[in-house]
Image (cartoon, rainbow, N blue to C red):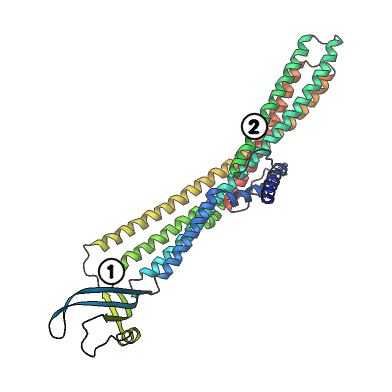
């Protein structure tokens, strides 16, 4: 009973923590990297590759085997006078043997090197998965903040509309405006409330997508705000080549392609090793025991077990040399295939470099365009704010109709929305450039 109570308490505490805390960007990224199923699978792949290295190291060591056999026989057998008699015998043997390789065309050495490359390749695959997940988490996190700011703008506009209804109703009751103007204000307020509901739903969907990416319950999930502020419109890097040159030194896809070329080189050496002779050795020791139950010669007796096994012990040492002469051109064709595979790996490396360069060039142009859009959005928003201030004064004095005032306010709302979009779009695209450059994207 106490165990069940403790379990329920632990579950309740865990749910409470999930529902009460606001996740920071770093916490989201760290949690995803620690608990994502794909990441866990790739970590296991690294461990499997490490075990392959241990297996390849074992090829340098000799094996050691012990064997034993025993048998009982019964049947007619001639005695000392030549008369066939029924005889029962027991035979057993024991052996200890070891075999090892002295030289096999450097295959063991090259297999070990390939296994070590496989570990590095698995680690690079893991790094690529972690990079992709980190970037996805950052993107979804910024989408949540983007939705929050849009909801905040919509809420402010709904509050403004609510106050305008009160003012318009007072004017209508005082006979200052017709009922049509009051209905227009109420219609605008209804649209603003609908916009709030829409933005709330957008925020809920953004939070749901982020929680699903983290693979945690979406109920009561929320994230903490980060200070995005007004980022500088100046690009972090002078040109795309700066980012590309840095990415070439550390980008996981490039390093993986380089490893494939190195692995192809080792495959060629492995296949060429079949041209060389193999030299191996074997050592061993054996003994046996025999017991005859009947038909012994007069005065003959069975020696006891330990005496027989000691007297019959034998040792053997051997060398085996295998020199390949002709194997139906199999080795030649395998070497040729390995050379072709290396060329394929080299072309894959060049293609990977080209793709990376194109991706970085596109990301740089996207960031550059986002910077210009952000600057334009800033100018537009400031202009619309001034226009709205003037319109508010004119509307309060009655020199501007409700329709014209709504037009000015709608332009301000659109400018605020465009500014929010431009800001987060620019922030994300600059983080993409940092991502390619190898810098942290969670700061």
**Which structural element holds mark 2?**
helix
From the image, state whether disc 1 or disc 2 is nearer to you: 2
Quadrant of the image occupied by residue 341: bottom left
Please indicate whether residue 310 sits to the left or right of residue 403 in the image: left
Q: Residue furthest bottom?
A: 299
Residue ID at (78%, 26%): 159
Residue 203 higher or lower than 86, as above or below: above
Q: Pointer 1: what residue? A: 275
**Which structural element holds mark 1?**
helix
Q: Note whether residue 244 is visible.
A: no
**Residue 404 at what x, y percent from top left?**
74, 18
Q: CA distance from mark 1 to mark 2?
A: 67 Å
Residue 408 higher or lower than 212, as above or below: above
Q: Pointer 2: what residue? A: 202
**Residue 370 at what x, y percent from top left?**
62, 39
Q: Residue furthest left?
A: 82
Q: Nearer the viewer, residue 31 or 345?
A: 31
Pick whichever of labels 1 and 2 is earlier in the sequence.
Answer: 2
Q: Nearer the viewer, residue 254 or 378?
A: 254
Q: Nearer the viewer, residue 100 or 94?
A: 94
Quadrant of the image occupied by residue 414: top right
């Amino acid at each position: 009973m106490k165990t069940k109570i403790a379990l329920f308490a632990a579950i309740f505490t865990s749910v409470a923590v999930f529902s009460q805390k606001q996740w920071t960007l770093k916490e989201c990224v760290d949690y995803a990297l620690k608990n994502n199923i794909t990441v866990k699978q790739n970590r296991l792949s690294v461990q499997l590759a490490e075990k392959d290295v241990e297996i390849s190291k074992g090829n340098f060591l000799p094996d050691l085997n012990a064997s034993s056999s025993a048998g009982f026989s019964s049947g007619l057998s001639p005695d000392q006078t030549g008369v066939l008699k029924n005889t029962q015998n027991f035979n057993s043997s024991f052996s200890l043997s070891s075999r090892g390789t002295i030289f096999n065309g450097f295959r063991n050495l090259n297999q070990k090197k390939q296994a070590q490359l496989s570990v590095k390749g698995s680690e690079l695959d893991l790094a690529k998965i972690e990079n992709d997940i980190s970037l996805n988490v950052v993107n979804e996190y910024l989408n949540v903040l983007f939705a929050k700011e849009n909801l905040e703008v919509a809420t402010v506009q709904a509050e403004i509309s609510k106050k305008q209804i009160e003012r318009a109703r007072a004017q209508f009751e005082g006979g200052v405006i017709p009922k049509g103007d009051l209905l227009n204000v109420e219609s605008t307020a209804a649209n603003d409330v609908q916009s709030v509901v829409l933005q709330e739903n957008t925020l809920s969907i953004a939070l749901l997508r982020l929680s699903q990416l983290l693979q945690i319950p979406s109920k009561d999930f929320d994230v903490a705000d980060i200070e995005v502020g007004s980022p500088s419109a100046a690009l972090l890097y002078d040109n795309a080549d700066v980012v590309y040159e840095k990415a070439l030194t550390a980008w996981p896809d490039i390093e993986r392609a380089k490893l494939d070329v190195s692995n192809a080189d080792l495959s060629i050496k492995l296949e060429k090793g079949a041209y060389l002779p193999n030299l191996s050795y074997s050592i061993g020791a054996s003994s046996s025991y025999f017991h005859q139950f009947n038909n012994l010669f007069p005065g003959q007796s069975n020696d006891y077990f330990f005496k027989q096994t000691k007297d019959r012990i034998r040792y053997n040492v051997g060398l085996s040399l295998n020199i390949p002469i002709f194997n139906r051109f199999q080795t030649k064709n395998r070497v040729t295939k390995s050379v072709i595979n290396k060329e394929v790996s080299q072309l894959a490396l060049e293609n990977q470099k080209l793709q990376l360069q194109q991706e970085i060039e596109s990301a740089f142009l996207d960031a550059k365009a986002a910077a210009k859009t952000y600057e334009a959005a800033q100018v537009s928003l400031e202009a619309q704010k001034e226009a709205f201030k003037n319109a508010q004064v004119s509307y309060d004095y009655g020199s501007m109709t409700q329709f014209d005032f709504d037009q000015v306010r709608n332009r301000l709302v659109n400018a605020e929305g465009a500014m929010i979009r431009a800001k987060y779009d620019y922030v994300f695209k600059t983080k993409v450039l940092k991502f390619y450059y190898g810098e942290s994207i969670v700061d």
